Amino acid sequence: MSDLHLLLIAVFLPFAGAIAITFCGRWPNLREAITLITASAVCASVVTLFLHFRDGARLSFDIVEPIPGISISFELEALGMLFALVASILWIVTSIYAIGYMRSHGETNQTRFYAFFAIAIGSTLGAAFSGNLFTLFLWYELLTISTYPLVAHAGTETARRGARTYISILLTTSILLQLLAIIITYVVTGTLDFRDGGILADKLDPAWAALLYALFIFGIGKAAVMPFHRWLPAAMVAPTPVSALLHAVAVVKAGVFTVLKVTVYIFGTDFIVESNASDWLIWFAASTVILASLIAMTQDNLKRRLAYSTVSQLSYIVLGALLASNASVLGSALHISMHAFAKITLFFAAGAILVASHKTNISEMDGLGRMMPLTFGAFLIGSLSIIGLPPFGGLWSKWYLGMGAVETGQWIMLSVLLISSLLNIAYLLPIPVRGFFGKASDGSISGRINEAPLSCLIAMAITSVACVLLFFYPDPFYELAMDFAGVK
Amino acid sequence: MIEQNLSLLLVVIPLLAAPVTAILPGSRVPWLCTLIITWLCFLLSIWQLSVVIDGNIISYELGGWSPPWGIEYRIDALNAYISLIVAGIAAITLPFALRTVEKEIPLRQTGLFYAAFLLCLVGLLGIAQTGDIFNLFVFLEISSLSSYALIAMGEQRRALTAAYQYLIMGTIGATFFLIGIGFVYSETGTLNMMDLHQLLLPIYDHRTIHTGFAFIVVGIALKLALFPLHLWLPNAYKYAPSVISVFLAATATKVAVYAMLRIVFGVFSSEFVDITPTNHMFIVLGLSGVIVASIAAIYQDDVKRLLAYSSVAQIGYMVLGMGLATTLGITATVVHVFNHALMKGALFMACGALVYRVGSSQFDKLEGLGRKMPWTFAAICIGGLSLIGVPGTAGFISKWYLVIAALEQQAWLIAFMIVLGSLLAVVYIWKIIEIMFFHADSASTTAVKEAPISMLVPMWVLVIANIYFGLNTELMLSVANTAAQILGVSD
């Protein structure tokens, strides 16, 4: 099979899977087997693509050309490869987790859940392999729409309200700001292709660069830069596997992925530095990092706390893009993968706690760690990786982001990163600490072990081990990030 | 020679078939007859477009009287394209009609219903084909009169008031149009459009011509439901039989848009338009239409009325493209005429399927219906996405050209308003989707089944066309380019 076929399989197999899942809705075991098989096949083709890519294979091709000069095209490129790798690996893990979670939580409409989940992943992979800005926008929108039924899954009034916030913020920003920015880019340059060094450099008056860049940064609502972050906490009404894969990995990372693509291939880092396009935008990213962390500290609902933590972490990546130095872009790209593995572990743990003990608030979790040692252990590992301590993968991305801040002489931004790490400690570590050492006030905690279903534990174990492994062997992601950032 | 004669058949066949259909017995026979006629017209219009798409022109002199004295049918790419839309939508609507007409129209009226339908088709095709401005008026009246009758056949008695309202407004419009023609005729002594174009050139500064132009523009604006002359449209679409909502929404206003294009740029010219405030009027009214009608759509509690208001908004986009009056602007209008026919056709068909099963298009009757009728629901989703203008659907192409046309003239505010309009479309489409899919079933929907296959197939043909023409735009763009040339619009 050629690379072209592999790429098409990776993008379109999930859609075929979704159809198959719909038709097998009556037989849960078959349906979930299809999910797992599809996920494995997709992952296998992405990994094969990655191996070929490492050997120097490059690929770009058009599917159709709706408007002369603007085609729907796919491309094999370093950052996209990294994103696809993360998403497809974690899809398998999440599927394993979801089977245990959805069954023991007695969720309804599971067929719909698995079908739209597959569509969302297909859209994510489509975004990852997009060959131009138009194609990327297309998948970006499809991802928004296909995740709506997942967020509104419960169908209750609260779920519907959360889903409405979710969809309205994402569509508003993307149509009103991002689409406008894309069209302006096209009018100015006559193309929407991704090119090394950007396409705007000689075409756009530098005075307008900051405005256009702002349209992109805020228009890419999935990157959740304040004040357009509210959809992410609102999306926490979704079942936990959705929050885990989509709102810690696929959807939010599709946002920052687009930011990075626009920064490097549309503007070009040199042009951003020359035109000072990001001078005032970095303050938005920096304040998002700090403010979201502070808000996270006030949240008692575990998933909401994690959501605000994600908002904060996403702005690390946006900040790295805005600093526009080699090291910061490298750090940002790396953070896509590192944060993904760590945050998904945290969400898995949150879901496991919900399934096993039906608790959602942190204040009720005192002493719970003694009943669920594995879950809380995984949570601890995930937290440490988010904070960026060795020996966990999260260290590397923070390292390069910090280096980027130093390189560009942005000392304030360096201190923002450091303060944020301290805040991470303050809002994440108390949870396992209270879990292990706290004393339950209502006596609901017995000494008996009462863990989540096995499949949830397996999933958590895989991602926690990955957090550690990524400290020692970050090579695959590191190479891709280096390739993307242009560091030789 | 064969080309000229075959072209005329496009109008003559349905005209002759209409009285025959009226006296056919039963419900299936007239339907079958109409079905055959519409498909014949569809094939003819495909053939016709294939002849003229490369810039050829078919000219037919009615009765052998040579123009400018006789009536001339003059087919260029734009005429043929509009005819294709009308005949195509009619051909796709007919299979859909069978079941809903049996349900909504009393048996003894069925023959008359199909006869009126054919007459309406004659009128719309005639407007698209003729090269004579008075003949255009005649066909406009044929189509309008038959649509008043068709709307009045709606199930509820309020269909009568809706049709009456439309009748009054439509007649005022027709009268204005006729007065305008009178003014122009009194100055030039001709009714042939090509001839008028030539004769008007030296007298652009005459008051009479300006007065006539104003009457004509207002008259057609009433027919195409340009905001704020749209008040007849929501009720007419709501109370009309389902098939008629589909057919009129997808074709009638589009043909009026064509008439506007042809007269404003073809009979008069962009030079004339430049010395009048027409462009500004089109832009202001188009944009207000987009915004006001979209907001009105959000507050409707009935799917058909919601879609009707959305139609008014979409007409705003088409008029806006005319107002920009550049090649790109006209391209956007011409493309959107086609695309809007596809999306509204699909949406109103889905709506018709809902009415067929539930008997109402009120939101409170549709709760949870999306789970009972998944195919219809999916059609609404995709049609809605196209209406919003999501990339990958036909709607995106027209929005794209419209925004580019605005940006080309540095009209940032207009570009922003266009995307704002898309956003409002998101809100009202989402309202339908949420009610149909995420609300608990209401009592009336518990035993509802999916729509019959004869309704699903045409619906899905249009849905797939929405996606196909969002990816392959060769046909529309080549016609749009030719049309811009024919109408003498340049940058």
Image (tube, rainbow, N blue to C red):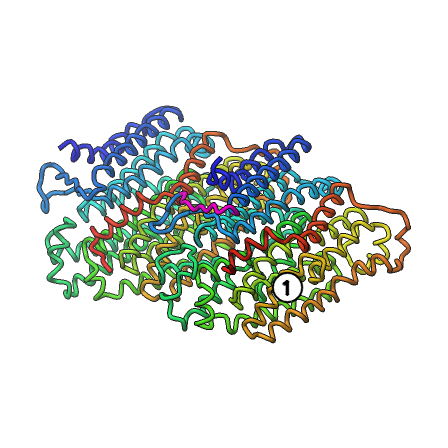
Pick whichever, B288 or B324, lies toward us: B324
Query: Within 10 Å of the Cα at label 1, are there few (<14), some (14-19), or many (20+) other Cα atoms?
Result: many
Q: Can the viewer see residue A202?
A: yes
Tag 1: amino acid? Lys
Residue drawn at 80 percent across, 47 percent down: A356
Horizontal side of B358 relative to B152 (left or right) equals right
Horizontal side of B153 relative to B276 (left or right) equals right
Q: Disc 1 on helix, strand or loop?
A: helix
Q: Position of residue A338 (x, y in %)?
A: 64, 56
Horizontal side of A436 relative to A382 (left or right) equals right
- Assign the N terminus of chain B to one quadrant of the image: top left
- Assign the C terminus of chain B to one quadrant of the image: bottom left
Asked if residue B136 is positioned above or below residue A485 in the image, the reply reads above
Quickly name the residue at label 1: A398
Q: Position of residue B44 (x, y in %)?
A: 25, 33
Pick whichever, B381 or A369, lies toward us: A369
Pick whichever, B68 or A330, lies toward us: A330
Quarter assignment of residue B107: top left
Q: Which residues are magenta?
A: A54-63
How many discs mark residues in the rendered view?
1
Asked if residue B345 is positioned above or below residue A232 in the image, the reply reads above
Q: Position of residue A190 (x, y in %)?
A: 34, 58
Any magenta on residue B27? no
Chain letter of the residue carrying label 1 = A
